[in-house]
Image (cartoon, rainbow, N blue to C red):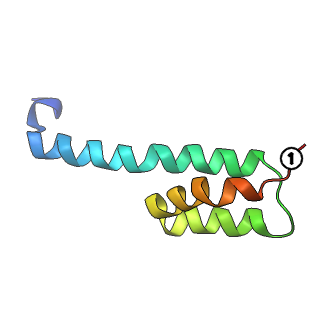
Amino acid sequence: MTYLGMIGPWQIIIISFVLLGIIPTIITLIDILKSKFNGNDKIVWVLVVLFFNLIGTILYFVIGRKQKIKS
């Protein structure tokens, strides 16, 4: 018997919500790490996104992107 046959609709819903939470966080962390910031702003944003996942991601895209140093 395979494990795939044992996955029910609730497990699929839970896995979908987890993936929807992880993917934007990863995209945000990549954007932060590739960008330049003043002082310790980069470290602060990484910690905010890691500790507050979805809320941190939203905050970064609303507030943090304006703090990036333009090249």
Q: Residue at x 48, y 67 (%)?
A: 52
Instruction: Give the percent coordinates (x, y) of residue 1.
Output: 9, 29
Q: Left of 22 or right of it: where is 8? A: left
User: Looking at the image, which residue sits at the far right?
Assistant: 71
Count the marks: 1
Establish if 66 lies above or below 31: below
Disc 1: which residue = 70
Establish if 53 lies above or below 10: below
Instruction: Give the percent coordinates (x, y) of residue 27.
Output: 57, 43
Q: Check the picture and name the quadrant holding the C terminus.
A: top right
For disc 1, the neighbor class at 10 Å (few under 14, some 14 to 19, many from 20) is: few
Q: Residue at x 52, y 63 (%)?
A: 56
Q: Left of 41 or right of it: where is 24? A: left
Front residue (pair 53, 4): 53
Instruction: Give the percent coordinates (x, y) of residue 60.
Output: 60, 58
Say what secondary structure mark 1 lies in.
Answer: loop
Q: Which residue is drawn at 83% across and 52% down?
A: 36
Q: Which residue is drawn at 44% across and 58% down?
A: 54
- The amino acid on which the numbered mark 1 sits, given as a three-letter code, is Lys
